[in-house]
Each structure stands twice: as C-alpha cells, then as structure tokens.
Amino acid sequence: MTNQAAKRIAEKAAIVARAEQFYRLIQQGVSAAKANKQTQGEFKEMLDRYTQLASEQAKMRAQPTHPGESKEQWQKHLDELTEQCKMSIMMAIKKDFADNFVTDEEQLQRDYIEKRERQVLELKMKGADSTYRKMFSGRFPDEFKPLFVGDLEERPLKFWREWDERRTQIVGQGLGPRNLFEEQMQWTKRGMMWPYPIDNDFMAGEEENVSFADHVFLESEMAKYKLPRTGPIAQFMELVLNGLSRNPFMSVTKKREHIKWYAEYFTDALKGKYKELFV
C-alpha cells in the first residue's frame, strides 16, 4: 500500500466516523447547522490521527528489507499489517457507535422518567386531587381480552426502519465492499448488472406491456391504407413488413411509423405525376 492509498483509507474512516456522530446529534434534537459545526472539529482530529497512522505505515514500507527475510516475506508482512490496521479502524468506529447509541437510548429513558416525575410534582403543587386513577393502573377486564390480546402486532414506523437501514449501511460498508459478492450487489443496485433471475424484458419501459404478436404480425396495419394488393408496391411492402417483423431492436410504435411513412409515400406517388411508374 502506497502512502497515497493509506491516506485515502484514513480519510474514508474519518468521514464514516463523522457521519455517525452527525446522525447521533440529529437524533438528539440538535439542528443540522450545529451538528455540522460540532463534528467539523472532531473530523479534523480523527483525520489527523488516521493520517499519522497511515504515514507510519508508509515509512515502514520505505524501510529496507529486514535481515533474514526475503523481499516477498517482508512485503507479505506489511500487507498483513495494513489489513489489520484497516480492520482495527472499522472495529473502533463500530464499537464507538454502538457504545454511544446505547448511552443515548438510556439517556432518553432517564429524561422521559424525570419529565414525568416533574409533571406529577407540578400537579401536586397546584393542589390537584392525588387520588385520581391512572388510565392503565387498573385491572384489565376479562371480557375484553379475547378482543385485543390475540390481534396485537408490532408495526414499526417506516421512517425509523429506513433510518436504521441507512445507518447499518454506512457502518458496514463505509470503507467499501469486503468481497466480490458485495461489490456485485452494489453494481446491481446501480443498474450495472442484470438482477437474477435474468429477465430479457428488464427495464424495457413501455414495451413490457406489448405482446410478441404485435411485433411479428404487422399485416393488419396494411388494412388502414389503400394500397394495391398486387404488383411492385405490394411486393415491396411485403418485404418491408418481413424486415420489420424480424427486427428485435425497434419498438412497435417505431415499426408502425415506418409502415405509415411508406404507405403515405406510395399513396402520394400514385396520386401525382409518378402514377405511371406504379401501374
């Protein structure tokens, strides 16, 4: 790994770490401008730290071959060290995110409990009746259990599900695909590879709703125009229909436009001064 490549890996790691910190601040209610400003300084510190680590690796590459080891063995040792460094950075980012996420969840629960306690205390200070019953403090009537208990199901909000999927994607693939399979999955999402199972009509657009018969049997289009049924014009149009029916690269609309152009051309020619050529 060259010095330039090591710096690129360090920069990617710092960008992923900053993105995770930015999303955590947004979840805590911090505005986007403040979150961006707060993570900017942390990004510089992380980038400097990762860049220093990359520079140290580059210096180790520049050192002469260790005595007693061949050049290939020394190169293999450096490649293993580089891979370990990359995995250490990824694990550090994931661990830091997991620790902070759990801490944030616990803090949200504590804040909610404290808020409820303050509300109850304010009610007591205002002289509210302390003997009131809470909505869910009583015993649930047995006659309603068959109506509700068996039909309960969890329905997570779509926004938070997409948020978690996006967060997992950033953490797991922030430094690029880990193998050829993940790389091909990314190519498929970008439209660079065909999805499996292979479909010849993939991304066909309007042609997905057109049948095979409309492409092949074009003789019905000739009934719309008053052209001779025998003679040179009929023979020529038969060749045109045969060629269009065998063309897999043209849409049905284009084929009909070709037939219409030829039909109008021969109709005008029969009505004009070239009539004797087509009789």
Image (cartoon, grey):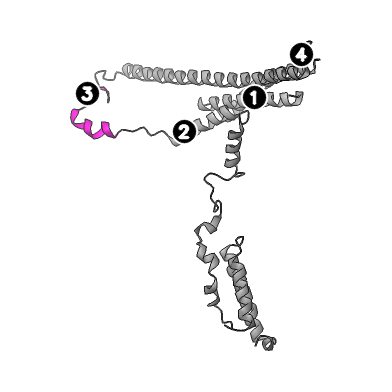
Of badges 1 and 4, the one in the foreground is 4
Q: Quadrant of the N terminus?
A: top right
Magenta range is 132-151
- Residue type pointed to by label 3: Arg
Q: Residue lying at the far top in this picture: please name it.
A: 67
Of badges 3 and 4, the one in the foreground is 4
Residue 232, above or below 197: below
Label 2, residues with CA under 10 Å away: few <14, some 14-19, many ≥20: few
Residue 200, above or below 32: below
At horizontal 71% and vertical 20% (from top left) the residue drawn is 76
Of badges 2 and 4, the one in the foreground is 4
Q: Quadrant of the C terminus?
A: bottom right
The circle on residue 13 is 1
Circles 3, 2 touching at the beta carbon (< 8 Å): no
- Mark 3 or mark 4, which has the lower sequence index? 4
In this orientation, which residue lies closer to the viewer: 119 or 226? 226
Return the x and y of residue 34 as percentages of the image width and height.
59, 26
- Mark 2 or mark 1, which has the lower sequence index? 1
